Amino acid sequence: MRYEGDIYRPPSEAYSYILQITIGCAHNKCTFCGSFKAKKFRIRHLDEVFEDLEMARRYYKRVERIFLADGDALVCKNSYLLAVLEKIEELFPECDRVSIYGRGTDILRKTDEELLELKAHNLGMIYMGVESGNPEILRRIQKGETREQMIEAVKKSEGLGIPVSLTFLSGIGGRELWRENAIDTGTIISEMEPSYASFLTLMLVPGTPLYDQYKRGEFELLRPDEVLKEAELMLENINVTKKCVFRSNHASNYVSLKGDLPIDKEAMIQKLRVAQHHSEMWKDERFRML
Ligand code: SF4
């Protein structure tokens, strides 16, 4: 119930109780991300976290979902995460899902047994920012993990029955690498077969390295119609065999898309094709936000 700094959560956790177990992001190097630049990373002391949970129990009558923040809270050791999950089970028996932000390398660092222990104590979703499937873009944005590592991590988690919700960034390759971003993002989703995938659209955040690159003319933003063309090519390159809930209806997107892959793929591609030539379908720049 006590929060330090700005708090970020996935849109689908809008009604969850947010528990901050870490402050900031342990990686904190991605060139486009300004979310945690003002925070020095640390893991909160368990006593403080338990106090927050007890406060929340007194305040909320019913809590069905809990989201563990900040940036990559899955970086915490399993013993710490288990202690938090067990306390949640004790205080919130009605809670049916705990979710968390994590990086691919966090998933890979944990053994299958450790992940299954977390699952047994109600960890039911890992949110992961992949951003792009293109190795060169991942290197340029200093993602700190490779395409191969992220594919392995998603397959591992999904294979153990912990669904993963992935985000990708339209426009993150700029004008120079838009085609590579589209094709490699489509193919990485095909290889990963995640339960959930969503496209956000890049917005430059002042104070980030990518913003500075843009100001120096080293990075070019795509126009809205180019973003839609890129998304069309991404979708064309997604070939999944099991259901993937697909969303591109974030506040940063120019055109809202919602569907299940593979069955709604063609309808979503058609909408993007039409929208490229109809600017009245685009969200006004003033209303876009992160
Ligand atoms: S994008 Fe994610 S991993 Fe990268 S700095 Fe931001 S919070 Fe950390």
Image: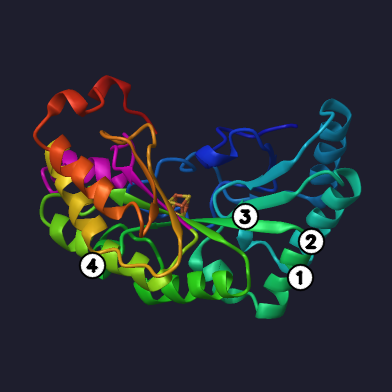
Q: Is residue 277 magenta?
A: no
Q: Residues within 10 Å of mark 2 (few under 14, many from 20)?
A: many
Residue 49 locus on image (x, y percent): 79, 45
Left/right placement of residue 110 relative to residue 142 reads: right
Answer whether residue 86 is visible to the viewer in this image.
yes
The kind of secondary structure element at disc 1 is helix
Magenta region, residue range? 196-222
Question: Residue 73, which numbered label?
Answer: 3
Q: Which residue is mark 4?
A: 136
The numbered mark, 1 or 4, whose residue comes first in the sequence reads 1
Do the residues under discs 1 and 2 have CB atoms within 8 angstroms? yes
Q: Residue at x 62, y 60 (%)?
A: 74
Answer whether residue 223 is visible to the viewer in this image.
no
Q: Quadrant of residue 138?
A: bottom left
Do the residues under discs 2 and 4 have CB atoms within 8 angstroms? no
Q: Residues within 10 Å of mark 1 (few under 14, many from 20)?
A: some
Q: Which residue is mark 1?
A: 117
Q: Quadrant of residue 144?
A: bottom left
Question: Residue 13, which numbered label?
Answer: none
* The one of 184 and 6 positioned closer to us in this rendering: 184
- Type of amino acid under label 1: Glu
Q: Is mark 2 within 8 Å of ligand 1?
A: no
The kind of secondary structure element at disc 4 is helix
